[in-house]
Image (cartoon, grey):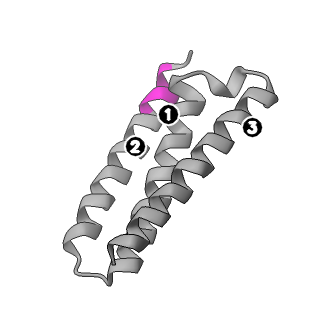
Amino acid sequence: MNTKLYTVIYVVLFVSATVQVLVEFAGLAYWTAFALIIVLSAMKAVLVAAYFQHLRWEPRSLTYLIGIGLAAALALTFAASYSIL
């Protein structure tokens, strides 16, 4: 695999993690900060699964199965965060 591609992915993941930390300290409304962090986390999860776990080169049916699992995990996260408030 191309080292340049992995470097770009690393930089994107690093910047996303940094933005998540900045969102925590930005003093945004709870749901705004929560939505931004969820979107960034989902983007990072997709990048890691696609490239570092080689899902990009697997059959589409396996990709859909993993996507359903991710959607279920996000739904449970939303449900848990709603019950906290």
Residue at left offset 50%, top offset 61%: 39
Q: Is residue 55 left or right of residue 51?
A: right
Crowd class of label 1 (few under 14; some 14 to 19; many from 20; radius 10 Å): some
Kindly identify which numbered label has been placed on residue 62: none
Residue at far left of view: 25
Q: Which residue is mark 3?
A: 64
Residue at far front of view: 83
Amino acid marked by disc 2: Leu
**Viewport quadrant of the C terminus:** bottom left
The quarter of the picture where residue 40 lies is: bottom left
Amino acid marked by disc 3: Tyr
Across and down, in percent, residue 83 comes to 39, 71
Residue at left offset 42%, top offset 73%: 82
Spatial CA span between label 3 and label 2: 23 Å
Region in magenta? 3-7
Q: Earlier in the sequence, mark 3 or mark 2?
A: 2
Q: Is residue 6 left or right of residue 18?
A: right
Spatial CA span between label 3 and label 1: 16 Å
Across and down, in percent, residue 20 comes to 31, 59
Across and down, in percent, residue 80 comes to 41, 63
Residue at far bottom of view: 29
Observer-nearest of 85 and 47: 85
Across and down, in percent, residue 59 comes to 79, 23
Q: Which residue is mark 2?
A: 13
Q: Earlier in the sequence, mark 2 or mark 1?
A: 2
Q: Which residue is mark 1?
A: 48
Observer-nearest of 81 and 49: 81
